[in-house]
Image (cartoon, rainbow, N blue to C red):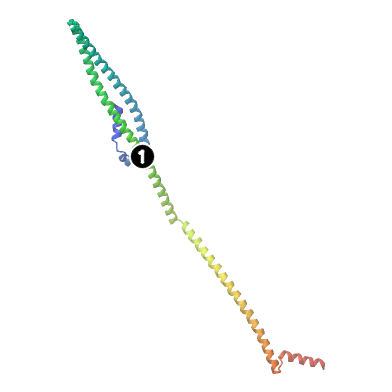
Amino acid sequence: MGIFRRISDIVKANINDLLNRAEDPEKMLNQMLIEMREQLADAKRQVAVAIADEKKLKRQLDLQVEEAQKWEQRAAAALQAGKEDLARQALARRNEAQGLAKQYQEQWEKQSEAVEALKTALRGLNAKIEEAKRKKDLLIARKKRAEAQKQIQETLQGIGQSSAFETFERMEQKVLEAEAQAEAAVDLNAELSGLDLEEQFKELNSTELDDDLQELRSRLGMQSQGQSEEQSLDRSVEL
């Protein structure tokens, strides 16, 4: 019953404790599942053999019970026929069959108990295998989640400590400076355009003032300096 002892050890084992002590829990669960399946296959074969032995003992028991009943009936028939010696021989054969039946009965009962124990162990082993499967799936999911969280933290930490974030800040500063320069250029162009317009209006106002001055001179019978010089020149030419 070595297989029974090994199965019992596995069933009694606390998977959580084993995982806590393991360096690589996932690897340990995989190995444990492999061993459990191997033990389960061996146990099933041995249980099948044990069940076959149980059935064989039961058949032998039934045969000896029938044999004892047969010789008892013969002993009764011989006694009724007045053949006491024959009846004695029949009873002796009956007693022999009953003795064998008793032995088979004891063996069959022990074998039945062993078979039930093995069946119970198989059910326990199946339960442990299912538990190990569930824990394996949960463990793998937890491991992947932990690795993802670790990767995210390392990435965030790397961004915080490296120059990547500073590069983004410098780029943002350059963009802000470029925008400020563009706005300044627009404002300057607007101001320059405003100055040109003011000069044009000033020239226009100056021309209007000259016209007004000439009109006033005309009304006063005065000539502008330019006209006086032209008239003097004309008189010189005539002379």
Give percent across and percent down for residue 120.
Answer: 29, 30
Give percent across and percent down for residue 156.
Answer: 43, 54
Give percent across and percent down for residue 6.
Answer: 30, 30
46 in relation to 159, above or below: above
- As helix, strand or loop, the secondary structure at mark 1 comes to helix
**Tally of numbered tags:** 1
- Tell me which residue sits at (26%, 17%) in the image: 62
Toward the viewer: 173 or 202? 202
- Tell me which residue sits at (31%, 32%) in the image: 123
Residue hosting label 1:
134
Quadrant in which the N terminus appears: top left
- Tell me which residue sits at (28%, 32%) in the image: 8
Give percent across and percent down for residue 134.
Answer: 36, 39
Instruction: Say which amino acid is labelled 1.
Output: Arg
212 in relation to 118, above or below: below
Toward the viewer: 181 or 68? 68
- Tell me which residue sits at (64%, 79%) in the image: 200
Residue 16: quarter of image: top left
Quadrant in which the C terminus appears: bottom right
